[in-house]
Image: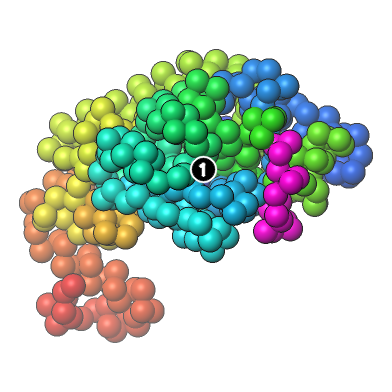
């Protein structure tokens, strides 16, 4: 059924029952059928955020990818207050870029990409400046670094700031306790560790904070969190037309997580990550960050000097394996291997065996790099058979 093994941080290979759920009956989203579907999904998703009592926390559902949920939070909870973004990678930078457009009192503390957040520096900053809201990413997907909710949450509380978190790539894989970590709002999406199709995102928030949103200025119509809250609270509905069939799939994947058990799911993902990591270490590969700082969904691997990452990805693709390449300052320096979705231990072994073969080819025959690369370059520019017949040496290697 699947063309590819998606060893990516999302999208994922979905479970068979999730694939079937998306084909369920057609319903009208303004009928009671959808009200019930939404109630069921909300009830199932809250435990992933440690929020079992629906009274204290609510979840709202947005048709749109993870960025929609982040933009909904950043456009709806800040008003004219001071927001500080903590960034140590691409997704922290994205939060900053979104907030800058929406909120004039946006500031940022930047740590390097792949560096840890410096808690002393954050504390000193919070003491010195008047900050009302602190925002950060839980799992910084660009490096694989898991930032500490507990520590930053405690610092925010101590300094009287609200704490909001992008949990897009960690929810469903890592423990998130909103109450214990003093998180007022956090976001996630359907297509990462939650393991459904892409296209839905979620904001989970404290009910008391949702209630206050109606007093704040409206900065977006579609992504107005206050409206989402109002609709779910009063009508069990979404303000605009939802992608109904994606909701069926989301309900099924959440049921799968609860059936397996949340803790068991975390342990299973960790086990897969450990197998993947040990296997890659055994092949002589090295990682961008310390294993103890990694999230259990993704491993960021340094590209060995004799390997061209474009060629590596193509060679894996020929074996139906898809991995991710590094972005921004990590481009060509790292590749990323995910272990979420329907990936079995056998699939991981298949990946490791394939990687071993390909790395062996790279070392045994260094010219391979040039030759495949040349063929790739030509095929990407729609080469004629004549051109492909040329000696690789006549085409400049990148
Ligand atoms: C994937 C991701 C997002 C959302 O990106 P989309 O392109 O909107 O799906 C946001 N934050 C993090 C940390 C992510 O990994």
Is 24 placed above or below 365 here?
Answer: above
| Magenta span of residues | 210-224
Queried whether the magenta region covers residue 185, the answer comes back as no
Is 51 placed above or below 312 here?
Answer: above
Q: Quick one: 243 or 181, which is closer to the camera?
A: 181
User: Residue at (68%, 23%) from the top-left corner?
Assistant: 56
Quick check: is the Cβ at mark 1 less than 8 Å away from ligand 1?
Answer: no
**Dot 1 alpha-carbon crowd within 10 angstroms: few under 14, some 14 to 19, many 20 or more:** some
Q: How was this image coloured? A: rainbow
Instruction: Check the image and name the residue furthest to the right.
Output: 31
User: Residue at (16%, 74%) from the top-left corner?
Assistant: 397
User: Residue at (24%, 30%) from the top-left corner?
Assistant: 291
Queried whether the magenta region covers residue 214, the answer comes back as yes
Which residue in the protein does label 1 denote? 132
Dominant secondary structure of the residues highlighted in magenta in the image: loop
* Residue 28 seen in this snapshot: yes
Q: Is residue 5 left or right of residue 72?
A: left
Q: Quick one: 295 or 113, which is closer to the camera?
A: 113
Image location (x, y in percent) of residue 359 = 17, 47
- Picture quarter with the N terminus: top right
Q: Is residue 245 left or right of residue 151?
A: right
Image location (x, y in percent) of residue 314 = 31, 57
Is 326 placed above or below 337 here?
Answer: below
Image location (x, y in percent) of residue 272 = 36, 26
User: Residue at (29%, 73%) from the top-left corner?
Assistant: 377
How many marks on residues?
A: 1
* Residue 6 seen in this snapshot: no
Image location (x, y in percent) of residue 122 = 33, 40
Q: Quick one: 35 or 71, which is closer to the camera?
A: 71
Tag 1 secondary structure? loop
- Picture quarter with the C terminus: bottom left
């Amino acid at each position: 059924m699947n063309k590819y093994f998606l060893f990516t941080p999302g999208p994922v290979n979905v479970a068979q029952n999730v694939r079937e759920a998306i084909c369920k009956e057609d319903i009208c989203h303004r009928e009671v059928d959808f009200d019930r579907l939404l109630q069921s999904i909300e009830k199932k998703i809250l435990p992933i955020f440690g929020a079992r009592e629906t009274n204290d926390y609510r979840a709202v559902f947005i048709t749109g990818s993870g960025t929609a949920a982040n933009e909904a939070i950043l456009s709806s909870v800040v008003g004219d207050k001071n927001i500080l973004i903590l960034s140590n990678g691409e997704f922290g930078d994205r939060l900053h870029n979104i907030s800058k457009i929406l909120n004039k009192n946006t500031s940022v503390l930047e740590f390097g990409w792949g560096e840890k957040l410096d808690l002393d520096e954050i504390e000193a900053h919070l003491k010195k400046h008047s900050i009302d809201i602190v925002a950060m990413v839980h799992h910084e997907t660009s490096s694989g670094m898991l930032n500490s909710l507990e520590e930053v949450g405690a610092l925010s509380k101590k300094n009287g700031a609200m704490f909001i978190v992008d949990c897009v790539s960690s929810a469903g894989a890592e423990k998130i306790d909103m109450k214990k970590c003093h998180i007022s709002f956090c976001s996630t999406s359907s297509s990462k560790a939650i393991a459904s199709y892409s296209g839905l995102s979620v904001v989970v928030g404290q009910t008391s904070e949702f209630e206050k949103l109606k007093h704040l200025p409206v900065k977006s119509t579609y992504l107005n969190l206050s409206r989402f809250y109002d609709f779910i609270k009063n009508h069990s509905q979404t303000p605009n037309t939802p992608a109904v069939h994606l909701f069926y799939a989301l309900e099924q994947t959440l049921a799968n997580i609860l059936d397996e058990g949340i803790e068991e799911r975390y342990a299973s993902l960790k086990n897969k990550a450990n197998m993947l990591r040990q296997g890659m270490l055994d092949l002589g590969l090295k990682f961008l960050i310390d294993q103890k700082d990694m999230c259990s969904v993704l491993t960021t691997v340094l590209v060995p000097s004799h390997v061209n990452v474009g060629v590596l990805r193509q060679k894996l693709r020929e074996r139906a394996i898809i991995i991710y390449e590094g972005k921004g300052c990590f481009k060509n320096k790292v590749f990323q291997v995910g272990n979420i979705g329907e990936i079995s231990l056998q699939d991981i072994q298949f990946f490791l065996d394939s990687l071993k073969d390909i790395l062996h080819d790279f070392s045994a025959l260094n010219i391979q790099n040039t030759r495949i690369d040349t063929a790739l370059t030509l095929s990407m520019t729609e080469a004629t058979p004549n051109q492909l017949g040329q000696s690789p040496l006549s085409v400049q290697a990148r």
